[in-house]
Image: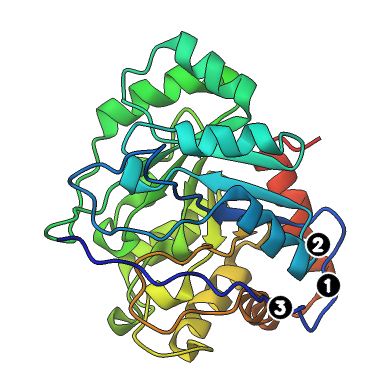
């Protein structure tokens, strides 16, 4: 039986630093109700209900104006929960969908009209933890979505792909990597795949989300083992960074974080207000087509 996740903290604190107007949380999920949006049998976890109203309450509490909902693995290709959430707040929210590699153009058009601006591809094998990169199929998908200005987002351990910068050097669309590249801190900074990710960022080919530090370490908040990885990414290419809460923090193995405290952690990673403006407002406006 799939493990049941803890519920999110319903009382996010106000961040200790000022949040700039039009800031964006680029990584969150909505879940449930299961009676309306059935979970796939092969899912890795069973989440509690986390509605779009709960999400926007969290955004309001920490002072963030915009959000991006990413299709979670529990629904497979069924994007209805995310799409219904986007319809509830179309000016405030954007989406990243999960689709088959051969998704019809008509479906892309439908998703685009609903507020979707990218597709997500999970390269982490749920059984072994290792992943394979189906580049030919990914290129075909990228060619389909390119006319719409979309990107491909990856959930993948970049340390497993030392040729990442060469693999995506001429990719048809931008690529986005979640969770700081998803390198377990125990492996250290000197991973060829992490170095390749930084080269890809510097070349203007990739974006990286400063999200979910608790997925990289077994340490508790403030996840100090993650600090060197965040610092390396900020030093490499702040123009290619995004920030997200990873709300409602499904399937985590450490204590449930407070979302205001997570924003405070980000502000310590990025103490310069001008750089925070870039990461929180300018970069997501470009990637997710906020107007």
Q: Return the x and y of residue 15 as percentages of the image width and height.
A: 76, 79
Q: Circle 1 — which element?
A: helix
The residue lying at 33 percent from left, 55 percent from top is: 156
Kindly identify which numbered label has been placed on residue 273: 1
Q: Quadrant of residue 161?
A: bottom left
Residue named by callout 2 = 277
Q: Is residue 200 above or below residue 58?
A: above
Cα separation, mark 3 vs mark 2, equals: 11 Å
Q: Quick one: label 1 or label 3, which is nearer the N terminus?
A: 3
Cα separation, mark 1 vs mark 2, equals: 6 Å
Q: Return the x and y of residue 166 as percentages of the image width and height.
A: 36, 45
Residue named by callout 3 = 267
Badge 2 crowding class, 10 Å Cα cut-off, few under 14, some 14 to 19, many 20 or more, is some
The residue lying at 68 percent from left, 42 percent from top is: 93
Badge 1 crowding class, 10 Å Cα cut-off, few under 14, some 14 to 19, many 20 or more, is some
Q: Is residue 106 above or below residue 148?
A: above
Q: Circle 3 — which element?
A: helix
């Amino acid at each position: 039986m799939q493990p049941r996740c803890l519920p999110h903290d319903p009382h996010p604190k106000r961040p200790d630093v000022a949040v700039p107007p039009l800031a964006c949380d680029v990584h969150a999920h909505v879940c449930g109700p299961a009676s309306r949006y059935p979970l796939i049998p092969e899912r890795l976890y069973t989440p509690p209900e986390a509605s779009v109203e709960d999400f926007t309450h969290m955004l309001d509490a920490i002072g963030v104006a915009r959000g991006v909902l990413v299709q979670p693995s529990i629904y497979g290709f069924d994007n209805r929960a995310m799409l219904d959430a986007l319809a509830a707040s179309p000016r405030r929210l954007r989406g990243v969908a999960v689709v088959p590699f051969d998704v019809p153009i008509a479906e892309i058009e439908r998703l685009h009209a609903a507020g979707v601006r990218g597709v997500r591809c999970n390269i982490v094998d749920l059984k072994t933890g290792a992943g394979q990169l189906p580049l030919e199929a990914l290129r075909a998908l990228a060619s389909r979505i390119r006319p719409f200005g979309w990107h491909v987002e990856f959930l993948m351990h970049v340390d497993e792909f030392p040729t990442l910068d060469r693999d995506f050097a001429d990719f048809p669309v931008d690529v986005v990597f979640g969770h700081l590249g998803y390198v377990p801190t125990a492996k250290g900074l000197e991973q060829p795949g992490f170095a390749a990710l930084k080269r890809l960022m510097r070349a203007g080919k990739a974006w990286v989300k400063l999200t979910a530090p608790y997925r990289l370490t077994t340490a508790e908040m403030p996840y100090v083992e993650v600090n060197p990885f965040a610092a390396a990414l900020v030093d490499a290419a702040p123009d290619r960074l995004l920030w997200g809460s990873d709300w409602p923090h499904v399937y985590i193995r450490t204590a449930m974080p407070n979302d205001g405290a997570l924003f405070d952690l980000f502000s310590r990673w990025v103490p310069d207000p001008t750089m925070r403006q870039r990461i929180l407002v300018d970069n997501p406006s470009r990637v997710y087509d906020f107007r």
